[in-house]
Amino acid sequence: MRSSNPSLGKDTFRGLEVDSGSTMTIQGTVNKTFILFLLLSATAFFTWTQYFAGKDIQSLLWIGLLGGFVVALITIFVKKAAPYTAPLYALLEGLVIGGISAMFETQFEGITTQAILLTLGTLLSLLFAYRSGWIKVTENFKLGVFAATGAIFFVYIADLILRFFGMGVPFIHETGPIGIIISVVIVIVAALNLVLDFDFIEEGVKQQAPKYMEWYGAFGLMVTLVWLYLEILRLLSKIRSK
């Protein structure tokens, strides 16, 4: 199995010790995902209120950004730690999501609500399409999404490096037609990663992965959802800037 989500790679379920009395289930993964969503929402709301109360949230953003990155790496390499690290990741990412959302909301009133609804709508729509068999996760589909996601990642890295020298990758931050088209493509690729995540989690259930992998699967979904939400937020801001 292949997933472009780094936390749900093709070797995720390889070599795991399986306890036949307690294995991964779809419902269990859904429950864990909901818990992570609640945790993320709690810290996002905290940062949001701090921002609109006039408090400096830069330290919260850095704690969330750097802490979330470190915890994500630990989760990926130490899967058994997922029941502890996945909730911590959600709490840390909430700090970032809340702060960024508040900043966008200051510029474009109502944009956060639009982004949240579009993200949840995309999640539910793709889940329904996947479960109904309308979307077939073939090897070519996986390879295409994997390649597109990798290309986006390298463009973002290149842009980050160029910005240290006062430059940047052309168009990706612009609000013109090309910039909007680029954001639409990125949102589509992020959304398609959800399909791969659904498929991969289902495969883990079939292989009777251990129970703690429910937390790991939920963590993988949260990684994709956070990315999707931020990209939708960016796309909406470009459109409204017009």
Image (cartoon, helix red, strand yellow):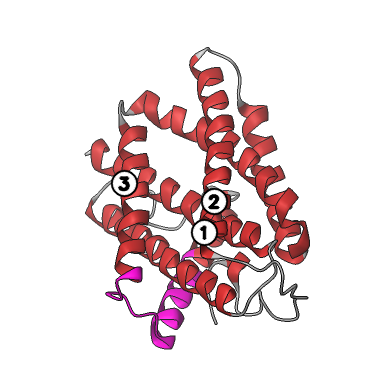
Magenta stretch bounds: 131-152
Q: Amino acid at mark 2?
A: Asn
Q: Position of residue 180 (x, y in %)?
A: 28, 53
Q: Tag on residue 31?
A: 2
Residue 240 falls within the magenta-colored stretch: no
Residue 145 falls within the magenta-colored stretch: yes
Q: Residue at x 57, y 57 (%)?
A: 28
Q: Amino acid at mark 3?
A: Leu
Quadrant of image for the C terminus: top left
Q: Secondary structure at mark 2?
A: helix
Q: Nearer the viewer, mark 3 or mark 2?
A: 2
CA separation in Å, label 1 and label 3: 24 Å
Q: Quadrant of residue 203?
A: bottom right
CA separation in Å, label 3 and label 2: 21 Å
CA separation in Å, label 2 and label 1: 6 Å
**Most foreground residue, 177 or 83:** 83
Q: Secondary structure at mark 1?
A: helix
Q: Nearer the viewer, mark 1 or mark 3?
A: 1
Disc 3: which residue: 118
Q: Is residue 12 above or below residue 42?
A: below
Magenta segment main secondary structure: helix
**Most foreground residue, 53 or 18:** 18
Q: Farthest residue in the bottom direction?
A: 139
Quadrant of image for the N terminus: bottom right
Q: Amino acid at mark 1?
A: Gln
Q: Tag on residue 27?
A: 1
Decide: few, some or many residues near mark 1? Use Cα within 10 Å; few <14, some 14-19, many ≥20: few
Q: Farthest residue in the front direction?
A: 21
* Residue 122 falls left or right of residue 84: left
Among numbered discs 1 and 3, the one appearing first in the sequence: 1
